[in-house]
Image (cartoon, rainbow, N blue to C red):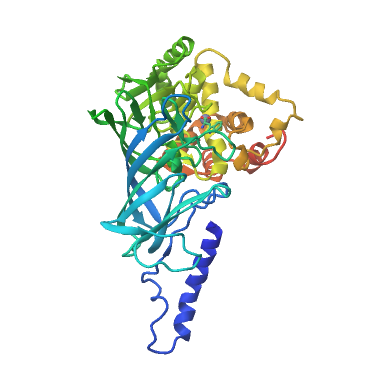
Amino acid sequence: MRVRMRVLGAVSAALVGVVTLVLPAGAAPAQVAPGGPRYTAGAAGAGDAYFPSAGNGGYDVRHYDLDITYAPPPAAPAPLVGQLSGVATIDFVATQDLDRFNLDLRGLSVQAVTIGDKPAGKVAPPAPGATVDGAAYWQVQDDAARVWELTVQPRPKIKKGQAARVVVAYGGQTIRPLDIEGALYGWVTMRDGAMVVGEPEGSMTWYPVSDHQTDKATYSFEITVPEGKVAVANGLPARDPVTEDGWTTWFWDAPDAQASYLTTASVGDFDLRFSETAEGLPIVDAVDDNLTATNRATTEASLALQADMIGFLEAAFVPYPFNSSGAIVDDDTVGYALETQTRPVYSRVARESTVVHELAHQWFGDAVSPGRWQDIWLNEGWATYVEWLWSEHSGRETAQMSFDDVMDIPADNAFWELPIADPGADDLFEAPIYDRGAATLHALRGKIGDDAFFAATREWLTRYDDSTGTTEDFQAISEEASGQDLQAFFDVWLRAPGRPTTW
Ligand code: TRP
Ligand code: ZN
């Protein structure tokens, strides 16, 4: 889809001059002169080979304001289906002259769209190349192809560089969406609420979004839930919750640039607790009332270490990148934790190694996100390596011992077959992404020395802060910091199958 759009764009750009030449004198040119407005459709994808229709082109989102009302499912044995309705107010700046643009939205239907103050009319998806009159919108929902698009045709058209506001009223039944590997993700309906974890492109299951990390934005939330339920999102409370007629609205503000997959708005029977680190960084923990006694004890012991872990990470790398921290621990489970920005989500229990892993992601993954999904080892390898460093710091297994454990995996084990710099969309979260990724970093540290390794890491976190970086960018920074040509090193560790022997 993305590729075809690029080709069409290139062809029509090339035709501009030609068409003008062959027109009889005085006839209106099909396109205005180069440099003038040339309105085209924004791309339907951000250009990620693993998820071609995730994200969109033609604009840059600055802010999402999400006003959501959610009714969790009725008691068992009713099906696990909730009801969500929302109004998303999206502020963006056009990066091309826009005739149409897309948002991603999966499984929910749109009731109204306005652009500026102009309402758009709902139409059936037009045939490719067909024109549509006036301001309009339409939805395509193709589960088999994993294509979920909302297209908006603004009138008047939007010029490159122009700021615009699109307001989308939408809603429907919430289900339990699955990612490309078959894991629960997105807005996961739970009996007591919802556990909201969007990696890699699951945020489109609960709000209209350009669902790719290359378009970060700030967020504000108003989440209305039945009285007694707590809704927890990213950042900090903007004001006290308001209860009216049996419904409570929770207000959260996330002022740091954020990738869409790191957005959460989890709903449940949470106990909300506010504390801060010695340096005054706010910590907001939301712990489900219904954890088992054992899980509660483990969780409380781990969460009590958060301030120390943040201090450890700041000393090793750069200051904590966001305005707040904390945790959401839900007794319902999708089976894994996610590093949702400022406030990771944990399934059933928060173990010490998982907490330091998710906190490490605040730097590695959240502040600096992977440029493409194939760069996922930069997230998981780093978060795993920080688990190793924390273990050593705590007087347990050293990083070298953890590295040796990985290298003890027999050379003929399937573990060594996955080229982790391009694992494929179906293998984003396989063990080698984590463990071979961490071993790569330890081997790099050994090869270039501690000074260059930590200098490179700080440069990585500074240069790509609030942005994204790729494996090639990481290699370039490692080469700059060390003065070494590391092509063979990174080929052996990331790109070639097989257990590395020399590097
Ligand atoms: N990001 C999670 C972590 O901290 C991993 C993850 C996301 C995941 N989606 C998943 C793991 C699906 C297993 C299945 O490691
Ligand atoms: Zn992780």
Query: In this view, which residue lies farthest toward the front?
Result: 77
Q: Nearer the viewer, residue 127 or 163?
A: 127
Q: Nearer the viewer, residue 450 or 495?
A: 495
Left or right: 155 in relation to 387: left
Percent of width and height locating residue 47 = 52, 53
Query: In this view, which residue lies farthest toward the right?
Result: 412
Left or right: 499 in relation to 156: right
Query: In the rendered view, would you say 187 is above or below 312?
Result: below
Query: In the rendered view, would you say 195 is above or below 46?
Result: above
Query: In the rendered view, would you say 108 is above or below 76?
Result: below
Query: In the rendered view, would you say 476 is above or below 408?
Result: below
> Residue at position x 44%, y 13% from top?
296
Quadrant of the image containing the C terminus: top right
Q: Quadrant of residue 247?
A: top left
Percent of width and height locating residue 65 = 31, 43
Instruction: Using the rendered image of the protein, determine whether residue 135 is visible from the camera's viewpoint.
Output: yes
> Residue at position x 54%, y 43% from top?
373
Query: In this view, which residue lies farthest toward the bottom?
Result: 25
Q: Nearer the viewer, residue 491 or 97?
A: 97
Percent of width and height locating residue 276 = 31, 20
**How many numbered circles does the render carry?**
0
Quadrant of the image containing the N terminus: bottom right
> Residue at position x 51%, y 65% from top?
128
Percent of width and height locating residue 13 = 47, 71
Instruction: Using the rendered image of the protein, determine whether residue 259 is visible from the camera's viewpoint.
Output: no
> Residue at position x 49%, y 42% from top?
201
